Amino acid sequence: MKKVLLTGASGFIGRHCIPFLLNRGYEVFAIYQNGVPVECDNVHWLKMDLLDPIQVEDMLAQVKPTHLLHLAWYVAHGKFWASSLNLDWVKASLTLLNSFSKHGGKRVVATGTCFEYDLSHGTLSEETTPLKPATLYGSSKLALSIVLEAFAKQSELSAAWARIFFLFGPHEYPKRFIPSVIRGLLRGEPVPCTHCQQVRDFLHVEDAADALVALLDSSVEGPINISSGDGVSLRSIIENIENTLQVDGLVQFGALQPQPFEPSHLIGDAKRLQSELKWQPRWDLQKGISNAIEWWSKNLAFTQ
């Protein structure tokens, strides 16, 4: 039986991966440190600190997974870009990969970020866009991808590196762009934003989870974008939310300044995802936004 170790299993992406892993016949060993485990049959929940190499070695010696889907990282909103904890997670991830291989692991998918690329290129391709991260977070992810590729070749490990773009949907961190707009409008509060002319590539989190699990279950190797391949302006996202909620006049455009490293356009080339994995998203933007609004409407009282 295929046995997968899923790190970051209670997080925004991880919790959505579990049903797709079960549907593909995996026995799931779900690693978490914080948060609440998802109630689901046939999932072995293991609470542990992945930054502790002794815990990691003991766990892998016992579980001996055949597959690894590595999502865990330091992602505290607004802090992760420059945090030195990125270095700790590079080290911890290398320890995890080495122990996974030593105990018989065969296939790994680890997650990177679109912020590994030279963002000035606008449309970002695995094959042609230079890699030039502008943050410690992006640099740390890129460093891990380089070592993983070399280690995989040396150890005969099958490995893919998933560069994730902009995700949204249920359980997203409340202060990120889409939930902050939805929550503010639901509460009838002013919503400060940038000029919102930036164009971004958004993908519903369930689609991202589906794509990651499809990638894990394939033989595709190397870097691959997890993206829709389509760009949409932040202003049009806001207009979509306003129209759905029938609210107007609360968004304060220009009240915030964009991050200094933010480009005007950032879109993922999804050709490899679509052609090699034969994968297509199930959620269009309108359906996804409606789903996010519905979820936040039900959970607004439980978030800060």
Image (cartoon, rainbow, N blue to C red):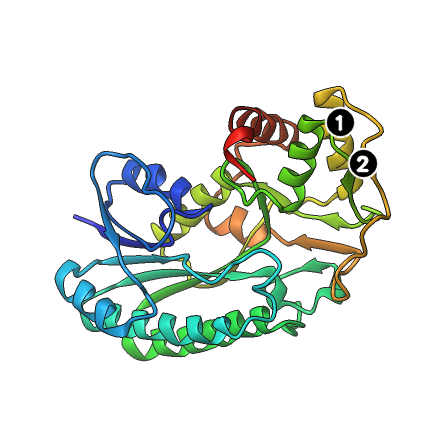
Say how many tags the image has.
2
Q: Give coordinates of residue 11: x percent, y percent.
A: 42, 48
Query: Mark 2 — residue?
Result: 251
- Mark 2 and mark 1 lie on one chain; the one further toward the N terminus is 1
Left or right: where does residue 155 sit relative to residue 58? right
Marks 2/1 in contact by CB < 8 Å: the verdict is: yes
Q: Nearer the viewer, mark 2 or mark 1?
A: 2
Query: Label 2: few (<14), some or many (≥20) within 10 Å?
Result: many
Q: Give coordinates of residue 16: x percent, y percent.
A: 41, 40
Image point (48%, 51%), residue name: 276
Label 2 secondary element: strand
Residue nearest the viewer, comparing 200 with 76: 76
Image point (66%, 60%), residue name: 124
Give the Cα separation between the discs numbered 2 and 1.
9 Å
Mark 2 residue type:
Val
Left or right: where does residue 301 sit relative to residue 177? left
Query: Mark 1 — residue?
Result: 242
Q: Give coordinates of residue 258: x percent, y percent.
A: 78, 57
Query: Label 1: few (<14), some or many (≥20) within 10 Å?
Result: some
Q: Give coordinates of residue 73: x percent, y percent.
A: 45, 62
Image point (49%, 42%), residue name: 279
**Quadrant of the rendered structure where residue 304 is?**
top right
- Disc sitting over residue 177 in the figure: none
Residue nearest the viewer, comparing 170 with 264: 170
Please tell me whether residue 44 is drawn above or below residue 110 in the rendered image.
above
Please tell me whether residue 244 is drawn above or below residue 192 in the rendered image.
above
Label 1 secondary element: helix
Residue nearest the viewer, comparing 253 with 22: 253
**Quadrant of the rendered structure where residue 220 is?**
bottom left
Mark 1 residue type:
Glu
